[in-house]
Image (cartoon, rainbow, N blue to C red):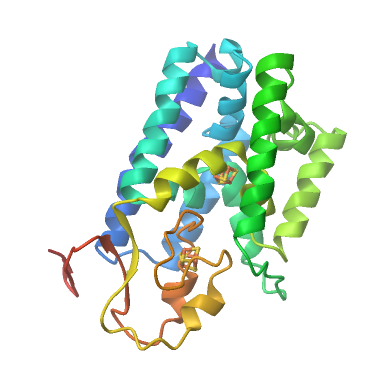
Amino acid sequence: MVFEQARALGFIYALVMFFILAYLWYTKRWTRRIAWIVLLITVALGFLIFSPIIPWQFQSLVLRDARGVGGPLAIAAAGLIVMLALSFVFGRFYCGYLCPVGAVQELASLAPVSKVKVGSKVWPGAIRWIFFILFIITGYFFTYGLLRLFGIRDFFLLLLSAGFFIFLAIIAISLFLYRPFCRFICPFGALASIPAMGSRFKIRRTDACISCGKCERACPTNEAKRGDRKGECYLCHRCLDVCPVEGALEYRRAGGVQTKEGAK
Ligand code: SF4
Ligand code: SF4
């Protein structure tokens, strides 16, 4: 019971932080230092209370396992819908910074080692949707949770099983390849990419852009080209970090006008 309440705390953390992060991005107060702090807190919550790990809760929902979601299934479904709705408004801040599974991969990706970039976002997405279909079929009809194969739970609960080492291997791959679990496997990530494509607030180019292409080369998910819809944007900030023109990229709503002091 205490553990279940603690998991609810994780959800509240994600909910509150979603707004705080969006505010910091919108007002251009976001810094790499803040990113580090948020990522570390999120990972710590993963280890301490195994929350807010929404992909795992999504799996429990598909398995109709009320104990696994830590409460009534209807409330868990509502929580999932809230996270998807917030992704539609603000983009994938949950995936970017508030999911312990994503956060630990993001931290690994910051390691200064040479990276492998997948030149397309089509086939990682296709693999993830195939996995999504298998995940729903095996979960709903055969009561088997495919996410168990990847050791998320064992890793964060420090259970030294085969799963623990599988997820450790995924983290090791994240050193070279950006977020392999999120981009190729995560069923919640597949769902979240849909509302994120139409998100009201996202990184947009302004008229100041000189088309140098630096952001496109820096983006690990191929989402920085003109007209990209940002379904796979994890708000990692790499494109903004490399952009040589101040104000050429801004996190804002469609048609919104930003000034250096903040948003109008
Ligand atoms: S894609 Fe899945 S694992 Fe990755 S951050 Fe999002 S919810 Fe977490
Ligand atoms: S580089 Fe920019 S567009 Fe690409 S994922 Fe990171 S924040 Fe999103």
* Picture quadrant of residue 220: bottom right
Whether 222 is drawn above or below 86: the answer is: below
Q: Which image quadrant: the N terminus?
A: top right
Residue 137 versus residue 155: which sits nearer the camera?
Answer: 137
User: How far across and how far down the image is residue 47, in percent?
Assistant: 63, 37
Quarter of the rendering containing residue 11: top left
Quadrant of the snapshot with the C terminus: bottom left
> Which residue of the protein is positioned furthest toward the left in this rendering?
264
Residue 238 position in % (x across, y down): 49, 71
Side of 15 where 27 appears, left or right: left
Position of residue 189 in the picture relative to residue 92 (left or right): right
Q: Is residue 18 left or right of residue 215?
A: left
Q: Residue at x 70, y 58 (%)?
A: 174
Expressed as whole percent of the image width and height from the top left, the position of residue 245 reads 34, 86
At x 33% / y 68%, what residue is drawn? 204
* In this view, 233 is above or below 88: below
| Residue 162 visible within the image | yes
Residue at x 66% of width, y 56% of height: 123
Can you see residue 53?
A: no
Q: Quadrant of residue 74?
A: top left
Q: Name the residue: 60% across, 20% down.
A: 62
Q: Where's residue 82, x and y in %?
A: 37, 31
Ligand 1 appears in which quadrant? top right
Furthest residue to the right?
162
